[in-house]
Image (cartoon, rainbow, N blue to C red):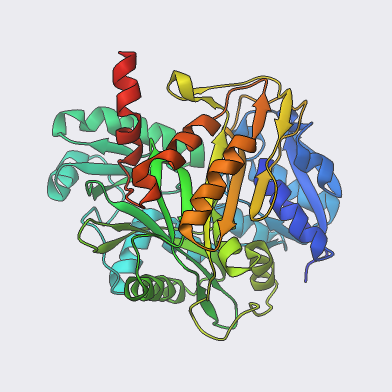
Amino acid sequence: MFKKVLIANRGEIAVRVIRTLREMGVGSVAVYSEADRSSLHVRLADEAVCIGPAIARESYLSIPAIIAAAKVTGADAIHPGYGFLSENADFSAACRDNGITFIGPSPKSIQQLGHKAEARKVAMKAGVPVTPGTKDCVGKNFRTEAAKVGFPLMIKAAAGGGGKGIRIVREESQLEKEMTMASSEAQAAFGNGEVYFERYIELPRHIEVQFARDTHGHTLAFPERDCSIQRRHQKLVEESPSPAVDKKLREKLEEAAVKLADAANYVGVGTVEFLLDQQGNFYFMEVNTRLQVEHPVTEYITGFDLVREQLLAASGESLLYTASHSVPYRGHAIEHRVNAEDFSKNFAPSVGRVEEWLVPGGPGIRVDTHVYAGYNLPIYYDSMLAKLIVWDQTRELAVARSARALRDFQVSGIKTTIDAHSLIVRSEDFKAGKTDTGFMERLLAPAEAAGK
């Protein structure tokens, strides 16, 4: 096992990783930009190094700065978290070339699966159903490629996920403008402006399967997560298991995830994302070669620590569970992403000083966050403040627990999306499990119409 791990990230995920490292007796190194000097991950880590100014490309996206910080502190491994450089093959290679273990897949696996267009090729070769789309990233002949795919289509960033670099195009006249915007957003988020096209499936469910694989060839597939409740392609609520997936479909989804992981000789933790249409057919969408934001719902229903599994796999040890490919689970978990946004003003960004920060507690409640009372929110990064995760023995009980926990969550000084989540859990469609990627538009339509 490693002696010291540098976390090449910020915010709640850096805090999350530090806590597992501490439990395992592994030293932790935080890196931070000048805007993050007062962030909780800096205070919790055993050591902390400033790697640059607030702007991400000069700090959290700077491979030379992060490698230098690892060398200076004597870290023998780097955990990339999610976002930033977590799916960057060049970063994985830089770690390898400098004698530092990258806690994630190899550069080759990232190129095969983390690059979305390449992952589609692997999926097709493995016999996993895919949506119609381009075989490679689109270039100057994008109009011709779009015509082959057909409208409506989605423009998607090839080098990363998290809802960045995605545009829906319903007719050819919109294509050039949306291409420019998608490519620019992808370049800013991932340092790579490549995009590809996929046929757009109307009102699907967004289903994903977490997997883990070690150097000994053990591959685990965890129960699926339903991430259908989204706004502008950003996930708001995730739950596991999905109310739309039965045992037979679950087995097929897990089998597809294992096939992809094995095909790429993947080592570490990753997630295969699928679209589930209204007829019950599923299609491969992409692979996230990193830890997902929503990983706690999987941890809650299975009892696994997925960061621990990442460390075990990266250090050459076996995963904790190797009895079968499928991981057993118990109960139901729901995650609510609480963002610094004003729900009453069309989710406008909210910045400032957090005056009051009282998180909910009690049985089956977990809050992952880097925020505390008195914390000043930087304006430069993602708006997520916390993840509220609840668990109970049934979905009905978990929904009720979510409603209670959201009422208990008290924040002042800034605006948050807590009220939006309360509206979601009160919805009869949500209570009945009738959700898809158009759920939020339908939920908010009456309020938006009234405001016009």
Instruction: Say whether residue 404 is left or right of residue 166.
Output: right
Q: Residue furthest bottom?
A: 323
Instruction: Say whether residue 22 is left or right of residue 436.
Output: right
Instruction: Say whether residue 397 is left or right of residue 387.
Output: left
**Which quadrant would residue 287 be assigned to in this image?**
bottom left
Please tell me whether residue 420 is drawn above or below residue 69 in the rendered image.
Answer: above
What is the quadrant of the N terminus in the image?
A: bottom right
Task: Give 195 or 17, whichever is nearer the viewer.
Answer: 17
Residue occupying image coordinates x 66% and y 65%: 305
Residue 86 at x, y percent in the picture: 57, 52
Residue occupying image coordinates x 23% and y 47%: 200
Residue 282 at x, y percent in the picture: 28, 63
What is the quadrant of the C terminus in the image?
A: top left
Instruction: Say whether residue 275 is left or right of residue 321.
Output: left
Q: How many numbered marks have been drawn onto this rendered protein structure?
A: 0
Please tell me whether residue 302 is drawn above or below residue 164 in the rendered image.
Answer: below
Residue 72 at x, y percent in the picture: 83, 49
Please tell me whether residue 311 is drawn above or below residue 324 in the rendered image.
Answer: above
Task: Give 61 or 129, whichever is nearer the viewer.
Answer: 129
Q: Residue furthest top?
A: 452
Residue 355 at x, y percent in the picture: 73, 22
Residue occupying image coordinates x 76% and y 53%: 18
Task: Give 125 or 18, whichever is nearer the viewer.
Answer: 18
